[in-house]
């Protein structure tokens, strides 16, 4: 196997879809199965992770593998919480504790 090339489109999809880069690497190295894509020169590398799958679109160019996109199926993969939600979960118990002390 030649070089694995990560396209800018792939990097955007990883960020946009909150997919862990390590899961993409595992999918490429140890797929459960490889399927031909609608595009003749492309394949889908599919890896099962419990309740969800990661699918990576891979195109061969000579000895190199160009990874063009990635997505997940079955959506049970825990997504990172937005910053505001993290902040609320951090502050709420502390505020509750602070106000309960003042009322006693």
Image: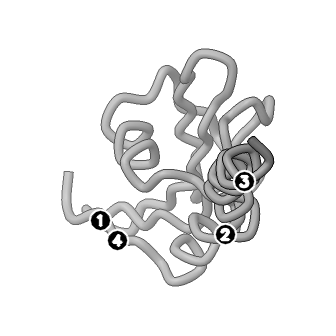
Q: Nearer the viewer, residue 25 or 50?
A: 50
How was the colour assigned to the protein in this rendering?
one colour
Residue beneath disc 3 = 102
Determine if residue 76 is in view: yes
Residue in the picture at 59% in, 16% down? 50
Residues at badges 4 and 1 in contact (C-beta under 8 Å)? yes
- Circle 4 crowding by C-alpha within 10 Å: few under 14, some 14–19, many from 20: some
Secondary structure beneath label 3: helix
Residue beneath disc 1 = 64
**Position of residue 37 measured from the top left corner of the image (x, y, whole percent):** 69, 47
**Above or below, comparing residue 60 to residue 33 in the picture:** below
- Circle 2 crowding by C-alpha within 10 Å: few under 14, some 14–19, many from 20: few
User: Is label 3 or label 4 in front?
Assistant: 3
Secondary structure beneath label 2: helix
- Which quadrant of the structure image shows residue 85? bottom right
Find the distance from the CA under tag 1 to the CA under tag 2: 38 Å
Residue beneath disc 2 = 83
Sequence-first tag of 3 and 2 = 2
Residue extending farthest to the front is: 104
Secondary structure beneath label 4: strand
**Position of residue 8 measured from the top left corner of the image (x, y, whole percent):** 51, 83
**Position of residue 68 measured from the top left corner of the image (x, y, whole percent):** 56, 68
Residues at badges 3 and 2 in contact (C-beta under 8 Å)? no
């Amino acid at each position: 196997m030649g070089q694995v090339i990560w396209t800018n489109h792939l990097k955007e999809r990883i960020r946009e879809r909150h997919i862990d880069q390590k899961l993409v690497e595992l999918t490429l190295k140890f797929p459960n199965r490889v399927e031909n894509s609608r595009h003749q020169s492309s394949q889908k590398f599919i890896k099962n992770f419990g309740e969800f799958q990661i699918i990576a679109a891979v195109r061969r160019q000579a000895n190199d593998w160009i990874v063009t996109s990635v997505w997940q199926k079955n959506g049970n993969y825990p997504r990172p919480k937005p910053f505001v939600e993290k902040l609320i979960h951090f502050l709420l118990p502390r505020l509750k504790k602070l106000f309960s002390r003042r009322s006693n």
